[in-house]
Amino acid sequence: MDHEFEETSGPTAEEQTSVNAKPPATIFVLYAGFWIRFWAYVIDLIVVGSLHRIFVYPVLRWLDISIIETSMLSTVAISTAVVMYAYFIIMTKLLGQTLGKMVFGLKVIDENKEKLSWDTVIFRELIGKFISKTAFFLGFITIGFSSKKKGWHDYFGDTLVIQERKGVPI
């Protein structure tokens, strides 16, 4: 019985003893846990509230729209939701992190190491977080118990939130 084998050559003796030869880089990934993500979110809420008060409130006042309404379908509530979701979607897509995540050195990455797509980010930030919030915040609480520190919105978007470290490739 004849078998064909292809001969492969390994590194030459020169390559093995070369001073310039570098060992393969080890990649360390630190998943961001519940509390650090919680505090990043608090900072993001302060940023969103500030953006809303600086840019949206003056426009609503100029249009003579009441900013004291408490209805969920009021102009203020809808504009707040639009500003908040736009902030999270745009910052996560363009930079992989919001200002709160930047402060704590956190970054959202695709679980398959691909570039974050608009579909992934919109599904994660809009639909995933909405579901995580409406189910008594259980979607966020799972971050504390998941091995990769994933919330429901991370599962929906196939994303991870990691801690960036200088000098460590991710």
Image (cartoon, grey):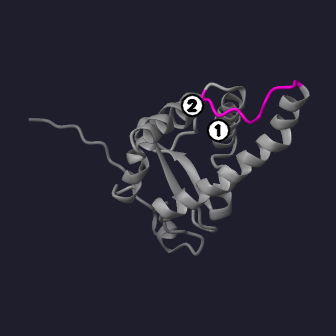
Q: Give the amino acid type for the residue marked by disc 1 in the picture.
A: Lys
Residue furthest to the right in view is 62
- Which residue has dot 1 on it? 93
Asked if one can make out residue 70 in the rendered structure from this viewpoint, the answer is: yes
Q: Secondary structure at mark 2?
A: helix
Which residue: 49% across, 63% down? 35
- Give the main secondary structure of the magenta stretch: loop
Front one among 140 and 111: 140
Mark earlier in primary sequence (2, 1): 1
> In the rendered image, which quarter contains the N terminus?
top left
**Does residue 135 appear to the left or right of 37 in the view shown?**
left
Front one among 17 and 147: 147
The stretch in magenta equals: 63-72
- Which residue has dot 2 on it? 122
Q: Position of residue 44 (x, y in %)?
A: 66, 51
Front one among 102 and 138: 138
Front one among 99 and 167: 99
Asked if one can make out residue 27 in the rendered structure from this viewpoint, the answer is: no
Give the number of the disc on residue 125.
none
Q: Position of residue 169 (x, y in %)?
A: 57, 61
> In the rendered image, which quarter contains the C terminus?
bottom right
Q: CA distance from mark 2 to mark 1?
A: 9 Å
Q: Give the amino acid type for the residue marked by disc 2 in the picture.
A: Ile
Q: Position of residue 14 (x, y in %)?
A: 51, 69
